[in-house]
Image (cartoon, helix red, strand yellow):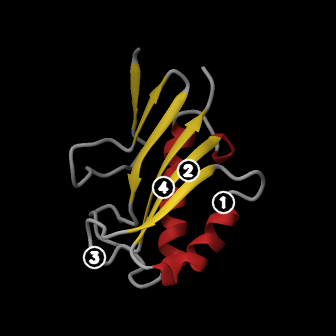
Amino acid sequence: MPKTVIIPPGTTTPIAPFVPGTLADGVVYVSGTLPFDKQNNVVYVGDAKAQTRHVLETIKSVIETAGGTLDDVTFNSIFITDWSNYAAINEVYAEFFPGEKPARFCIQCGLVKPDALVEIASVAHIGK
């Protein structure tokens, strides 16, 4: 099955060997997305809401570049560093997914950069 690499305009080089997204058979797989600026520095240090908004805007750009919308998201994997940020993250998450919500899971773990409070990976079915 052929695949297409999805790289939104203005995307910086990732900190590891991966691409922002891959489209295969009408499904967009969005890599784990951290709250990074163009130099791969963490933005909005200490602000879980702002970091979540930044992450979801980045995911939105990957899906839109592939030809879809956030309404096409069927699954999200959410990684947080502290359960005390769970409510703040969910508040912003609900803004991006106001209607029927995608399936998801959320775990607490360490992330690649200590100032990052949230990472999200997504799957979206945009059709063929």
Residue 64 drawn at (x, y percent): 57, 41
Looking at the figure, which quarter contains the N terminus? top left
Residue lying furthest right in this view?
99
Judge from the rendering whether residue 69 lies leftward or rightward of residue 65; answer left or right: right
* Of the two numbered discs 3 and 2 in the rendering, the one whose residue sits closer to the viewer: 3
User: Which amino acid type is marked by label 1?
Assistant: Phe
**Residue sitting nearer the eye, 67 or 92:** 92
Label 4 close to label 1 by CB (< 8 Å):
no
Q: What's the CA distance linking mark 2 and mark 4?
A: 5 Å
Q: What's the CA distance linking mark 1 and mark 3?
A: 25 Å
Q: Which residue is mark 3?
A: 114
User: Which amino acid type is marked by label 3?
Assistant: Pro
SS at mark 2?
Answer: helix
| Residue positioned 26% across, 65% down in the render | 112
SS at mark 1?
Answer: helix
- Within 10 Å of the Cα at label 3, are there few (<14), some (14-19), or many (20+) other Cα atoms? few
* Of the two numbered discs 1 and 3 in the rendering, the one whose residue sits closer to the viewer: 3
- Within 10 Å of the Cα at label 1, are there few (<14), some (14-19), or many (20+) other Cα atoms? some
Q: What's the CA distance linking mark 4 and mark 3?
A: 20 Å
Say which label, 3 or 2, has the lower sequence index.
Answer: 2
Does residue 98 lie above or below 41 as drawn? above
- Within 10 Å of the Cα at label 4, are there few (<14), some (14-19), or many (20+) other Cα atoms? many
- Which mark, residue 60? 2
Say which label, 4 or 1, has the lower sequence index.
Answer: 4
SS at mark 4?
Answer: helix
Q: Which residue is mark 4?
A: 58
- Within 10 Å of the Cα at label 2, are there few (<14), some (14-19), or many (20+) other Cα atoms? many
Q: Which residue is mark 1?
A: 96
Residue lying furthest top in this view?
1
